[in-house]
Image (cartoon, rainbow, N blue to C red):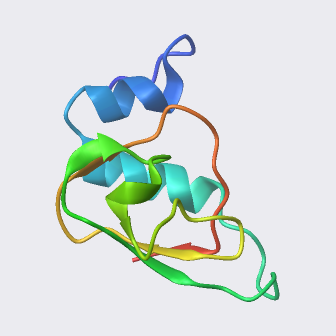
Amino acid sequence: MNTNSRGGIRSVIRDGHGPIALVAAALATVTAPGAASAATLTWNGVTGDWTIGSNWTPGGPPGSGDVAVVNAGIATLNSSSTIQGLT
């Protein structure tokens, strides 16, 4: 797994470890319980950018009070993001 200081988690995701790296990235930024009302957003199974709303159902991307569900595909995260949970 490539986690060099220059590429960080982005390098890990681009190196083909998408779902595993995404879980690690999300767990590193999960907020404390009690955040604003959470929505559950499901990744549409595509290979694409985490921040594109049309890649999520209902329209996303997930925010700090939301739970993200990624069952298939590869979600690429190229910026920091904070979510309530990931399943």
Q: From the viewer's perspective, is 54 left or right of 16?
A: right
Can you give x and y, in whole percent of width and height, for residue 59 in the image? 46, 68
Figure check: 33 above or below 50: below
Query: Residue 4, how many percent across, how many down?
Result: 48, 16
Residue 13 placement (x, y as % from top left):
33, 35
Is 33 positioned to the left or the right of 68 in the image? right
Q: Quadrant of the N terminus?
A: top left
Q: Residue at x 30, y 52 (%)?
A: 20
- Please give the name of the residue rendered at 78% of the width and 76% of the height, measured from the top-left corner: 32
Along the line of sight, which residue is nearer the eye, 28 or 78? 78
Position of 25 relative to 8 (above/below): below
Question: x, y percentage for residue 18?
Answer: 27, 44
Apparent side of residue 61 relative to residue 84 in the rendered image (left or right): left
Figure disc tally = 0
Q: In front: 78, or 8?
A: 78
Instruction: Name the residue at 48% across, 32% down.
Output: 9
Q: Which residue is found at the position 35% from the left and 23% from the top?
A: 2
